[in-house]
Amino acid sequence: MCQDVEAEFGDAAASLAANSDTTTISIEDPGDTPKHQPGPPGGSGREEDDELLGNDDSDKTELLAGQKKSSPFWTFEYYQTFFDVDTYQVFDRIKGSLLPVPGKNFVRLYVRSNPDLYGPFWICATLVFAIAISGNLSNFLIHLGEKTYHYVPEFRKVSIAATVVYAYAWLVPLALWGFLMWRNSKVMNIVSYSFLEIVCVYGYSLFIYIPTAILWIIPQKAVRWILVMIALGVSGSVLSMTFWPAVREDNRRIALATIVTIVLLHMLLSVGCLAYFFDAPEMDHLPTPTAAPNQTVAAAKLS
């Protein structure tokens, strides 16, 4: 028996010696970890470029994470996802809208992981009341001390401000989203944004007008126009730097016309609010005294 076993091992050793090219499998210790294989030269630079452009795998992970199964649109859970944001994210996005960084995309830095409607909704609501209340106070301070002036609160300014602000915050992003979708069908490599992302950008870009509207109470036109230019420069920069990557691969004229239109509409909103709510003509003076009815009858009898 022992001789047969030794003969089998001998034949196996002889066959291995004869076939030196035979592939062998080695079993390593599980605790040993392979060394990192160096990548091709210039790879790190490529990764840095992709990170700056927002083309890294993190964006893909965020997009895939956002593709989870959603509830039907007629349920409360469907709309609850649009307000699923914490206080830190809201403050971070407000800070990003007030301090735009050149070359940085607001959507990719703050919005794309979790676009929300909570911040834009309350920013617009606060802006509405800030414009309406500040407009009333400004009108009161301008005519303060005039004997013929009688202060009457203009509550209609609240409804007018709400219509203007919410229409701008929803209709302009809707039109821009439709335009980008149309151009994306013409130029395939255009960066695309969802409608919710565009609404989110527009909503947070309006935050700077809240302190601006409060400071518009100062009855000095020069100060008001300086505040308008500062607010327009900050918020306009956020919009321009966000939507320029979405149109820069398009025709040069179309890209420039799109950015100019975005800035002009933003300017129209700010200048229109200043002109209507704060530079309105004097309309709240006391009416001129009229003759009493008994005096009118007596004058008719004498004649």
Image (cartoon, rainbow, N blue to C red):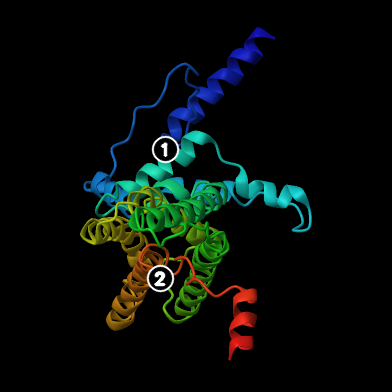
Which of the two marks, 2 or 1, is nearer to us in this view? Answer: 2
User: SS for tag 1?
Assistant: loop
Image location (x, y in percent) of residue 42: 22, 48
Q: Is residue 206 visible?
A: no
Image location (x, y in percent) of residue 178: 52, 75
Say which amino acid is labelled 1: Asp
Identity of the residue drawn at 45% across and 35% down: 19
Q: Residue furthest front?
A: 302
Identity of the residue drawn at 45% across and 56% down: 136
User: Residue 253's image quarter?
Assistant: bottom left
54 or 277, which lies in front?
A: 277
- The answer to whether 9 is drawn above or below residue 243 in the figure is above
Residue of label 1: 21
- Measured in 3D between alpha carbons, the distance from the residue under mark 2 to the one under mark 1, in whole angstroms, is 54 Å
Numbered badge on residue 190:
2
Crowding near pointer 1: few (<14 within 10 Å), some, many (20+)? few
Identity of the residue drawn at 38% across and 49% down: 214
- The answer to whether 20 is drawn above or below residue 274 in the figure is above
- Left or right: where does residue 93 sit relative to residue 121? left
